[in-house]
Image (tube, rainbow, N blue to C red):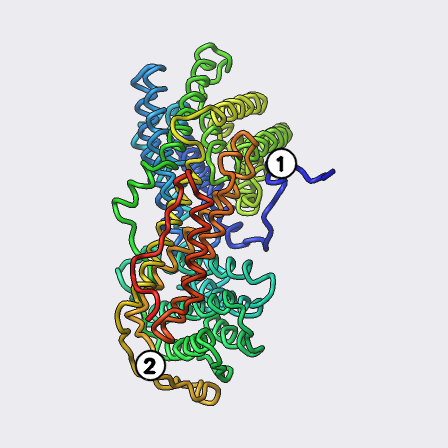
Amino acid sequence: MSLAPPPWLAHALRAQRGPIPWSAVVRGALSAGPLLLAGVLADRTSLGVVAAIAAMLAGINDRPGSRRVSVKRIGAPALAGAVGMVVGTYTGEYVGAVTLTVLLTLVGLLAGGVSAVGPVASGAGTQLLVASAIGAGMPLPEEGWLRAVAYLGGGCWLLALRLALPTPGALAGDFRFDGEREAVAAVYEAVADLLDAVGTEHATARRVALTAALDHAQDALTGPRLRRYASSAAERRLHAQYAAALPLAEAATALAWAEEAVPGRAPAGPRRLAAAVRENTHTGPLPAPHRSGPALRALDDALLRAAEAFDRGRGEDLHTRRLTTRDLLRSVFGAGGREYGLRVALCFGASAAVAQALHHSHWYGEHAHWYWLPATAVFLVKPDLGPLASRVLCRAAGTVLGALVFAGFALVLPRPEGLIALVAVSGALIPVATRHFAAQTAVVTVLVLALVMVGGEPQASASRITETLLACAIVLLVGHLPMPGQRGGGVRSRLAAAGRAAQEYLAHVLRETERPLPRETPPPLPRGAESAVRDIRTEGSPTEDTRAPRWTLRREAYRALAEARTAIAHAAAELPALARHSEGADEIVAVLERIVDTTTACAVHLDDSGRLTPEQVGRLTELLDELGRLDEGRGRVEVRLPEVPLAG
């Protein structure tokens, strides 16, 4: 008999690990607390409360990454929250309870559908709904537009701290690239780790880690900038170093797929490149070549070209494609967006209706604030925060703990200075508490209760616990209601996206068998690599212009697979009534991963010989047949061999 806890409980007990993000802790301490203090000193306490709430929510989005990524990760949700504040304030003032509930439900439908686009859109949807609930359910003397300005100012204040304050990267002497340089270096380390694991049981896990490192580096480098292209020599050099890692990752994946023997010195090259990225220096001596097979030849060629790219430092292409309007609409109105939007709308609308009913029946006593219940429901219904049962359990436990802790502090702290200090301390704890949803909930509960008490609301720990439990019950009920269409829409949409990306990548690679590949003369040996890289001269290899589209498609395929894996893991940890709708999805995505790995190996072999072997064609056909059998009758994915010649 197994004593292991069920998946939904195991997920609730799991916490992330890692070093304390001290720079984020400092930003958290300087965000909500000082804003609240400024509002109190200026005799505009209510605006200070609104700005501090926005800074708190921005702090939840202040995750590790580069400054460039933080602009959209923090700025876009703050802007959406300001819009929500306007919507909530004016609808709450000028319409009745029934009309307000209908309007908030429609806002929930919109925000839920948009949240399916990606993490930044999901954060924007969250703040849109939370700010709408606060605007409608927290009576304040200021006009709605002024509240929105205060809210946007609070989010922008934390963003300004993120952009201006030094980080570990800045302290090392490179203020511009606080997260980008480390992210690119981590890619080369992941390539070396994968080479170390070739032929072992750890190879698959290392390939997954390489995908995560590439995703992180790509995100770190592709955030907004003032100019469309890299605007400095240092930035162009970093872009070139990232692009040079793509053929290395491709060759390492091909070696892992073929389980070829890798010389012990092979991982040393990528590790030296990683050190060169971190220290912003030349590569130095690289290991001598070992060219006994196509994948090893590709690895050695990629090392040489990486050294040349490091030396010349010219590059702009990050091998990404902008989302088209069609892609966005497919995400919003696809199976995942429809199901999630409907669920968010029902949860948000029902919780707003219950909150208003309790408010108008004077269950709150003299309290005029009814925002807590719908705002709690928003966080509970968010799938990117974990499985539903885990979220509900953690939210209930965290709220009870936070409310009890605040009740104790409220008895002894002087007002308002003691409560302002408590807000500052809670803001500093948020970056650490985000590792577990219950801990995050406890810290946020303490912070919000302190904020609203400074704003004039009486101590309300008991009512907040009751409202949280009501929200948990509403979300659990709505979360298990039957919905129109097929269940598991989030998993279905992610699988479909992964299938489309795999199909496009496979078709592109196999089309390369239809035409002769352009060749170029290998580049001269770069400075600092003459003594180590010897005799690397081939008949020619495909140009980077030829392979760039392939690398873009490969990145999209692996990213889509990683997103599908995450969605499946969350769905599998739901209660059995929901988890059963995603059964078999993990087997499908595993086959898709093997198809993409095989396609990568085929691409490397095509670069070397211009044709595929019968064994490679047979392996692809076998995997596609297996995919068809697993997905038979479900219609979640469709990948097939393009009608092109497969061998010359």
- Circle 1 sits on which residue? 9
The picture quadrant where one finds residue 302 is bottom left
Where residue 169 sits: x, y (%)? 48, 63
Where 141 falls versus 635 (above or below)? above
> For this view, does 549 lie left or right of residue 499?
left
- The residue shown at (51%, 12%) is 363
The disc at residue 540 is: 2
Where residue 224 sits: x, y (%)? 32, 55
- The residue shown at (41%, 51%) is 560
- Residues tagged 1 and 2 counted as in contact (Cβ below 8 A): no
> For this view, does 481 lie left or right of residue 128?
right
Where residue 219 sits: x, y (%)? 40, 56
Query: Which quadrant: the N terminus?
Result: top right
**Dot 1 or dot 2, earlier in sequence:** 1
Question: Does the image show residue 38?
Answer: no
Where residue 502 sits: x, y (%)? 38, 54
The picture quadrant where one finds residue 164 is bottom left
Q: What's the residue type where badge 1 is placed?
A: Leu
